[in-house]
Amino acid sequence: MKLYDTGVYLVNGTDIVADDNEAAAKLSSMGKKADKEQAAEGTMAYGILKSHNTSGNMKELQIKFDKLTSHDITYVGIIQTARASGLEKFPIPYVLTNCHNSLCAVGGTINEDDHMFGLSCAKRYGGMYVPPHQAVIHQFAREMLACTGKMILGSDSHTRYGALGTMAMGEGGPELVKQLLGKTYDINMPGVIAIYLKGTPVKGVGPQDIALAIIGQVFKKGYVKNKVMEFVGPGIANLSVDYRIGVDVMTTETTCLSSIWECDDKTEEFYEIHGRKDDYKPLHPADVAYYDGCVEIDLSEIRPMIAMPFHPSNTYTIAELKDNLMDILEETEKRAKVSLGENADLKLKEKVHDGKLYVDQGIIAGCAGGGYENICDAADILRGKSIGDDDFTLSVYPASTPIFMQLVKNGAVADLLATGAIVKTAFCGPCFGAGDTPANQGFSIRHSTRNFPNREGSKIQNGQIASVALMDARSIAATAANKGFLTGADELDGVDFTKPKYFFDSEIYKNRVFDSHGVADPSVEVKFGPNIKDWPAMVALPENLILKVVSEIHDPVTTTDELIPSGETSSYRSNPLALAEFALSRKDPEYVGRAKKVQKIQRAIEADSCPGDADPGFHEVMNAIHTRFPDVNRHNIGVGSTIFAVKPGDGSAREQAASCQKVLGGWANIANEYATKRYRSNLINWGMLPFTIPAGDLPFALGDYLFIPNVFDDIRNKNTSIEAYVVKDGGLVPFTLTMGELTDDEREIIEDGCLINYYRAQNNK
């Protein structure tokens, strides 16, 4: 695999010409010109973005999407926000799926209450509703929503349908609210990186292996961060569409913005199988297309991969892991203490028996693993074998009921059940820590999207720890055939991959999915369960801001799972205050208490009482501020909390990573950089300031108060360098905060205090 240090020209879809001193001559010899600006318009990404841009300026985009999709962890908050902002009907197709809170067993009735909320909203506002266990969000979108040349926005980070020619993006809920209210998705024109595929995968190598190989190369370098990955090259023709989808969905783990693939006769066949041939059109780059970088991959060189805990980028070939087993396991155990704290006592080395690594659990599931070809190939490997009667278990979740139906018809389900494996309905739980939690010290191998800390459901604070490694379904099946001892699919002899044809049965959805066909019915009453709560009131940005540092995180990357845990907390996503109690609970258990103490000061200010009554020590803070700013008083300040993290926001699109901080009185994050655009956008949409400071020595510490004078004017005046002070020893110690570029709307959102306030203000004009 080669990462180019320069941009590249792609000529006729096959030839790479590096953008160096010889580029013009090479292009000329091919009858082409080195016109970088014109060639940049030749990418597939440029064409799709241009057709959806409403700004008239291709450097500063204002995108309107064709369709929206959400699942049952996110749609309640989105619709509640939109309702509070004036929603009357869904202006574009909006699909509400139910694949996360499908286990209606946690917290009484609240999960099913959310589902009934979703169904009633689909009826009232004119949407679609996919009941639990019918399909995971992204498989339904592939089967029923994707169209070549179109754009879909989803409130799940793995919203990726590029293999079908649809540019899809996963964002926090407020970005979907903007679309529901007729607004736009505002970004600068992103860079576009060519992912150039050549060759053919060897037998036993699956899409997860290709994806993990790419992630391992690009994530730590930030090579594709916030850029579009554009898959091109002759190797695409050697991959089935199901295989392409399996690679594509994992592009989220590179921190790219979106993805798009060339579309050919195989793509057309996919649409035809699903009864939507008219939604297909060929999609290729122009004869000359310019890319900001290139990842060149020979598919024939990829071997079965494993991503060890606790990130999809911790990649090795399975052969490499076996050859260096004890060293890599020891490194993983050390990584556990970095990610989970010194109390995390992971004991992976104890799983080595006679030089072989024993695995406790295998899972093939969700939008990445639950595809038809993945499960068929796994069944071929396991046919006639047994997974054994020891610790090892295997669970398989087809990604949709139509896939499940076809697996029943072709015998794959029977083959899997005969081995001792369990086949279950469509569910995203194994990917985010709900369901299939292994025993303490369990080691799970999963064809799913993520292996972040706690994604398998362990609770470090209760002394429970387990871990997940990511693998392809074929190698998971090979391991199962070897009764739990780690085995790569390329180690097997004599496996015949039968590749049975897929037949899609649309009647399954016609019989069960509610589709309003875009017709709203205002007479329908929205159904509210007792756990569905409105957002609390949030105040506007003050003239001057006092922040207290209530958490300090020095991990290289902080995931959204660590900011607000997944798993059982998902049942409380419809209750902002109840969910906020879990904020940072697995990373910094004292955070909530510290934030609430600061919030009491702000509430005293809002009540026009003395903030010193809430915290007597606050008088000293004000005295220090008055040494330089005597006009500052409780009538022109706001007081809130902030966290510092080196690089927060990797992973999920969940807005609650930001909103939980906000409802606890958070007014800012301070970071060296933000892991993803979507997390930074979530902060902004909840009225929080996304500050940055240079890497190195911190000018403040946990528990320090920070004073930011004239912060409102700084935001209004588009200042990128912001004066700030640490309150220390009765005085003020200056330092500088920086603020990246904000759109005019984003500045107003921060000034108003949050997106809800912003839209209320807009409606009152």
Image (tube, rainbow, N blue to C red):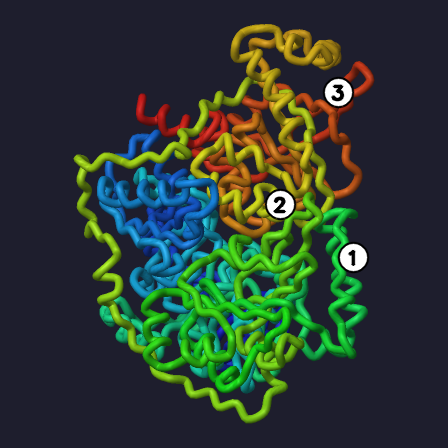
Q: CA distance from mark 1 to mark 3?
A: 37 Å
Instruction: Give the residue type that dot 1 points to.
Output: Lys
- 321 vs 251, nearest the viewer: 321
Q: Secondary structure at mark 2?
A: helix
Labels 3, 2: front one: 2
Between 624 and 736, which is closer to the camera in this rendering?
A: 624
Q: Quadrant of residue 405?
A: bottom left
For residue 603, above or below residue 569: above
Front residue of this view, candidates 472 and 629: 472
User: What type is the residue that disc 3 sits on?
Assistant: Val
Q: Which residue is mark 3?
A: 727
Q: Which mark is residue 326?
A: none
Image coords of residue 393 (percent x, y): 57, 69
Q: CA distance from mark 3 to mark 2?
A: 29 Å
Instruction: Give the crowd class for mark 1: few <14, some 14-19, many >=20 residues within 10 Å.
Output: some
Q: Which residue is mark 1?
A: 334
On residue 562, the disc is 2
